[in-house]
Image (cartoon, grey):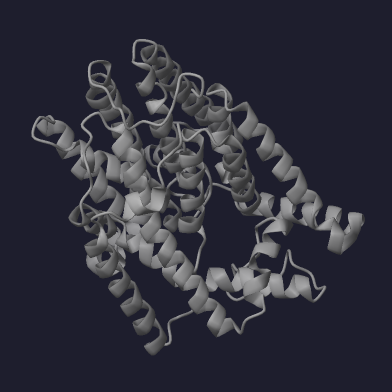
């Protein structure tokens, strides 16, 4: 079956949200420029590193902008930012701000489109709901725009990848996945899911794309130069992930910090042991979730099979900042889960579940420096409250889908789903 044209669908009846959001984003841009705070320090790293690469200079191990402004992405990613490095830095910042803004709006609309086909209730999302979500993620959104990071662009690419997978276009999905991995390898967390869901063609294309992306810089730098570039990249990533001491929002740091504060043990716990332990726990829990979904799908109609794949995919993406050492704006990857949970809040939803959803959202969104003050903000940061809120969002998504959506799907059809038994 040919998939519907997606963009007219996701834009339908959402013009109010688009107009209001564009107006706010333009105001942010104007105020940042007027106040001379239009810095975009993260984008400056991409821009200066690409500029240095084009000029034959070193890329890794140098500071571009702030003291923490080391280029940490792959050599291939430099080619993505090269076109912008041709522009003057001021103009390039404006272009990149517009790209992030467009990705932000499109991501929200596309996530809603994907979730509407997943939810048994068939709920649609209004402009008001989108504006509520934008309010919830506003602090992370502002950091994304102020720093000029790539999280919203990568999230959009991953959602497009998911849409292509649901439409049976594994080759296109594989190309997108390879592109994302070459920019930020953290998304490799999705690869085992593709294997379990038998997306073999997509995986093969991804691996081919990765190989191409790794070899491509050799055309400019030569084979030996390309090897040196990748060694420096791996070393930079290793240095960045060297310690969990300040990674307050990871599940490993939450565990180590609590044990340290409670003084339960008198001996030193290895950080590597903690990481391995929690990776095993997360893998086992999520593996159980996937296999149980597959088991339940055997009793569903052909049109309904594979609906769980969307939720599994989105949960894995949302878990990335809890498993990897990243900054707070990376928690924007949980936007689809927030949309999903808000969609579950209906008259028949238990009061306790609504309370937990609101609590998780508060923990996720509360750390706004100007709202809570410096002292409280520092306490929230050092105690990993954002990470706890995100883990609660993940847990509630798993519970909500299993108990409110997956059960209902046994008796209610969803004719809009564009998958067949052969695809999943």
- State whether residue 43 is above or below residue 290: below
User: What residue appears at the point 41 percent right and 33 percent down from the top-left corner?
Assistant: 310
Q: How many marks?
A: 0
State the image quarter where residue 366 is shown: bottom left
Measuring from the top left, give residue 245's x and y in whole percent. Answer: 52, 49
**Closer-to-camera residue (385/119):** 119
User: What residue appears at the point 37 percent right and 67 percent down from the top-left corner?
Assistant: 142
**Closer-to-camera residue (81/306):** 306
User: What residue appears at the point 78 percent right and 53 percent down from the top-left corner?
Assistant: 230
- State whether residue 422 is above or below residue 59: above
- State whether residue 221 is above or below residue 173: below
- State whether residue 181 is above or below residue 62: above
Residue 269 in sight: no
Image-based side of 385 in relation to 329, left or right: left
State the image quarter where residue 298 is shown: top left
Measuring from the top left, give residue 364's x and y in whole percent. Answer: 30, 50
């Amino acid at each position: 079956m040919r998939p519907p044209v997606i963009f007219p669908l996701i834009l339908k009846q959402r013009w109010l949200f688009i107009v209001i959001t564009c107006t706010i984003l333009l105001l942010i841009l104007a105020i940042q420029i007027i106040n001379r705070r239009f810095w975009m320090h993260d984008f400056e790293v991409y821009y200066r590193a690409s500029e240095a690469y084009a000029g034959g200079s070193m890329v890794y191990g140098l500071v571009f902008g702030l003291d923490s402004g080391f280029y940490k992405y792959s050599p291939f990613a430099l080619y993505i930012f090269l076109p912008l490095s041709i522009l003057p830095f001021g103009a390039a910042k404006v272009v990149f701000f517009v790209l992030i803004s467009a990705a932000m709006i499109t991501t929200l609309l596309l996530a809603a489109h994907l979730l509407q086909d997943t939810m048994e209730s068939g709920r649609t999302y209004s402009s008001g709901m989108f504006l509520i979500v934008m309010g919830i993620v506003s602090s992370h959104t502002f950091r994304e725009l102020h720093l000029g990071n790539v999280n919203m662009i990568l999230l959009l690419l991953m959602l497009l990848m998911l849409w292509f997978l649901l439409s049976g276009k594994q080759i296109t999905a594989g190309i997108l996945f390879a592109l994302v991995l070459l920019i930020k390898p953290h998304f490799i967390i999705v690869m085992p899911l593709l294997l379990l869901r038998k997306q073999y063609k997509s995986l093969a294309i991804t691996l081919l794309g990765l190989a191409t992306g790794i070899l491509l810089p050799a055309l400019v730098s030569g084979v030996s130069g390309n090897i040196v570039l990748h060694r420096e990249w791996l070393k930079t990533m290793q240095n960045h992930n060297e310690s969990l001491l300040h990674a307050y929002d990871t599940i490993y740091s939450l565990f180590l910090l609590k044990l340290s504060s409670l003084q339960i043990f008198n001996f030193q716990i290895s950080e590597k042991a903690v990481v391995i332990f929690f990776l095993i726990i997360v893998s086992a829990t999520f593996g159980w979730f996937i296999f149980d979904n597959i088991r339940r799908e055997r009793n569903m109609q052909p049109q309904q099979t594979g609906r769980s794949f969307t939720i599994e995919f989105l949960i894995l993406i949302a878990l990335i900042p809890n498993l990897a050492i990243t900054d707070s704006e990376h928690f924007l990857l949980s936007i689809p889960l927030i949309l999903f949970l808000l969609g579950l809040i209906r008259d028949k939803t238990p009061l306790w579940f609504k309370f937990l959803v609101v609590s998780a959202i508060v923990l996720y969104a509360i750390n706004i420096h100007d709202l809570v003050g410096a002292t409280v903000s520092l306490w929230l940061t050092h105690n990993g409250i954002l990470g706890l809120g995100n883990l609660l969002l993940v847990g509630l998504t798993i519970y909500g889908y299993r108990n409110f959506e997956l059960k209902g799907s046994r008796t209610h059809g969803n004719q809009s789903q564009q998958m067949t038994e052969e695809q999943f």
